[in-house]
Amino acid sequence: MAMQAIRTVAEMTAIRQQITSSVGFVPTMGFLHQGHLALVKRARSENSIVVVSIFVNPAQFGLGEDLRTYPRDPQRDLALLEEEGTDIVFMPASEEMYPQGFNSWVEVGEVTQRLEEASRPGHFKGVATVVAKLFNIVAPTRAYFGQKDAQQAIVIEKMVADLNMNLGIVVVPTVRESDGLAMSSRNIYLNAEERQAATVLFKSLNLARQLWLAGEKSAHEIREEMISLIQGEPLAEIDYVSIADAQTLEELKEIDRGALVSLAVKIGKPRLIDNIILE
């Protein structure tokens, strides 16, 4: 069938009720890149019907963040999704998702209170709420998220488990540029010099992996080496460098179990995040 673009909750719900086969769902904020398309490809390979949402969620942007200037190109997004064989694109307006009088929120506990939350208070309340709403509207069999947003994926998995939501969560490996930079819609904000500087994120993650493979188990030692490398890049301003339990996100002293090595670094205006897992 031809790809359908749907703009209202009522229409999406009505169409969903007619589908009896498996539904793979990819929630996005649009301005799609190869990282998003990797999620769509995976969903396409594992489900009869693929639904992608495009919604720049105002509830997950904090004060002074780039909601107004967040990059948007819906026509290009639709063309890319059609090429990937997407069946349905759900593109609601803010008033559809947050009608007048809206006042119910989903909050996930401890895993949201670390890493990103310190810099972006309330961010995960906005993410969990919109994703819960989208799951209720689309009722997917499986939903697909990128490893680049590792904490987000952990938060969603926790919410789905705690609230007995009846769907599978699939986390797909980070898609990178040829020089290692994780693909992100915010990379468009980088000028040529900043784009070159941004490679320091992946270099520092690789350094962490090399040290760990060489037998270093002290999270403190590895973190210090990473920080030192990043500080050698004049355009980089560190927000955090973390080596944490891959499930709970508690900071580790010793790497004695699966560890998420993650970081947030400002390069010029954009704040970039990336991570790897050591296990």
Image (spheres, helix red, strand yellow):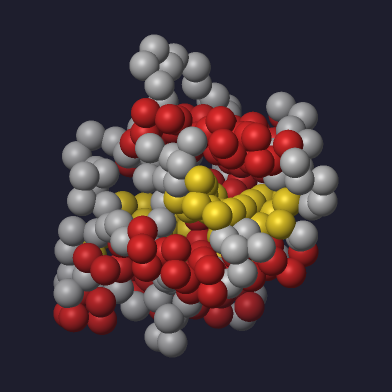
Q: Front-most of 254 and 131?
A: 131
Residue 250 appears in the picture as rendered: yes
Residue furthest to the front in view is: 1
Q: Which residue is depicted at the point 59% across and 49% down?
A: 153
Q: Which corner quadrant holds the C terminus?
A: bottom right
As drawn, is 55 to the left or to the right of 150? left
- The x and y percentages for residue 60 are 38, 37
Residue 255, relative to residue 156: is it above or below?
Answer: below
Q: Which residue is depicted at the point 41% across and 56% down?
A: 30
- The x and y percentages for residue 188 are 26, 68
As drawn, is 85 to the left or to the right of 262? right
- The x and y percentages for residue 107 are 53, 25
- The x and y percentages for residue 255 are 63, 59
As drawn, is 19 to the left or to the right of 75? right
Residue 228 appears in the picture as rendered: no
Q: Front-most of 36 and 189?
A: 36
Q: Quadrant of residue 174?
A: bottom right
